[in-house]
Image (tube, grey):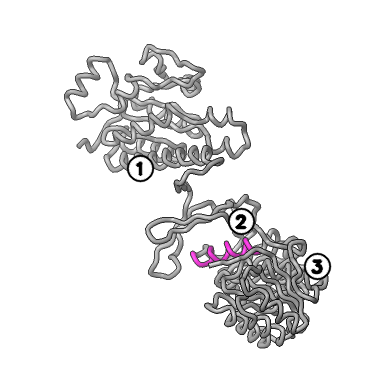
Amino acid sequence: MSQSVQIKNALISVYYKDNLEPIIHELNRLGVNIYSTGGTETFIRDLGVDVIAVEDLTSYPSILGGRVKTLHPKVFGGILSRRGLDSDAQQLEQYAIPEIDLVIVDLYPFEETVNSGAGQEDIIEKIDIGGISLIRAAAKNFKDVVIVASKNDYGILEDILKSQHGATTIDQRRTFAQKAFNISSNYDTHIFQYFDQTEPMPVFKQSIQTSQTLRYGENPHQKGTFYGNLDAMFTKLNGKELSYNNLVDVDAAVALIDEFTEPTFAILKHTNACGIASRLHTKEAWLDALACDPVSAFGGVLIANAEICEATALEIDKIFYEVLIAPAYTDDALKVLTAKKNRIVLIRNRVELPNKQFKTLLNGVIEQDKDLVVEGPAEMKSVTEKSATTEELKDMYFANKVVKHTKSNTIVFAKNSQLMASGVGQTSRVDSLKQAIIKAESFGFDLKGAVMASDAFFPFPDCVEIAADAGITAVLQPGGSIKDQDSINMCNQKGIAMVTTGMRHFKH
């Protein structure tokens, strides 16, 4: 196996020419023969550097509007030839094929073209054929060839050319090949996903090019990595880096707050809301959200959907929190919020979020559509003798949004667009209800006149009976149990209202 290879001949054909000029000059200084095509060839000539047109090597012009330029044995033979194999060397000599030791090629911007909203014809033309073939060929033959498939690696190549005088090591070539195959597989994944939009095939493919290593995973003995572009999603104004657990909570916080249009503040702990309120002003929303469970709020993730002013910031600053997220902050608010260096303060930027979610499970992956539905008053069917009031319908809509984003089994109490208490993640719905009642009473809430929402139907009337005795006056549930009538009868007996939505919101 060849360990060190001197670059004698290079093929350069790129879409992005940013920072390419220093490499061209360095190759020229080293006496490397440069082969090129089209716009790259013109770019090199304009730098005053000699370049050999690929069509002069192949004796064949670029045809079909540029669709076929480099697809020729004299190009691919020079890339794929095995330097230590006599038969390959003899064929190169027989057909006058130069050994190509360096390939600098990138790909047409397919993903960017799709995201721009371009038409199908433009998108199809951005499916690279020659480029992807050159990348694969050079990466396959990394024992003898350097492949640079991204402008992000131009600086690395320039340093190697300068420090090693045009020679590369096997480890360097293998690293470049690894990056090249990553680029090619990512490219093919996005092409597949474009064609998979109408009738999805039973195939799971994902490819994300950006990542960051987290301090650790869910626990210190677990490694953690985030794949994606957090800088696009958030602008960090203060604090340490987000941890694995922070990110899980932040994801839940973003999903919850997006249900609300009026000024709303939510406090989350372990992905569940321990406080949320909608008010005319952000400060009042914060104070009423905190009142729900000020104990659990300690060390939580806080999120608002409106600008945070200094008065709100002064109130927030009274407790310890991990992360604070808002679309904007006043300058005076930031002075308060950034005084403590470890507290993470984020501006949320508007980024389109995926409508699918997936996770590893057993020896595979499960995927589903996100739960993007929440039923409002128009979808609430009255099933009891007593009908819910307009205010109760409004509060049940509020509670239904919270239920949707709370771990099953869950029960949520709400009044005046404020979470009063919730029972979260219990194995019995009755246990969730009892938990919610205890929490509401412990923080001084009077449940008289409050509403109750459940993520699933009541198979027995016990929950309704207990809730009514605690002061609840209206109940929302999906319905669908063969014993629905038992719960309806209990509501009628207790003189409270019940609505069904026909939509379950389990969250595991």
The N terminus: image quadrant: top left
Query: Residue tagged by mark 1?
Result: 178
Kind of element beneath mark 3: loop
Residue 392 sits above or below residue 462 on the image: above
Residue 32 sits above or below residue 323 on the image: above
Q: Work out which residue is located at the far right of the displayed protein and give it.
A: 390
For the residue marked with disc 2, what is the amino acid?
Thr
Mark with earlier residue (1, 2): 1
**From where the camera sits, is residue 334 visible?**
no
Residue 210, horizontal then vertical, whole percent = 48, 49
Q: Is residue 220 left or right of residue 273?
A: left
Residue 176, horizontal then vertical, whole percent = 36, 40
What's the distance in space between the residues labelled 3 and 1, CA to CA?
54 Å
Magenta span dominant secondary structure: helix
Query: Residue tagged by mark 3?
Result: 280
At a point 61% along the width and 66% down the height, the residue shown is 405
Which contiguous range is marked in magenta? 244-256
Q: Based on the displayed image, in which of its 4 quarters is residue 291 positioned?
A: bottom right
Quick one: 14 or 281, which is closer to the camera? 281
Few, some or many C-alpha atoms within 10 Å of disc 2 (few <14, some 14-19, many ≥20)? some
What's the distance in space between the residues labelled 1 and 2, CA to CA?
31 Å
Residue 464 sits above or below residue 183 on the image: below
Residue 19, horizontal then vertical, whole percent = 49, 34
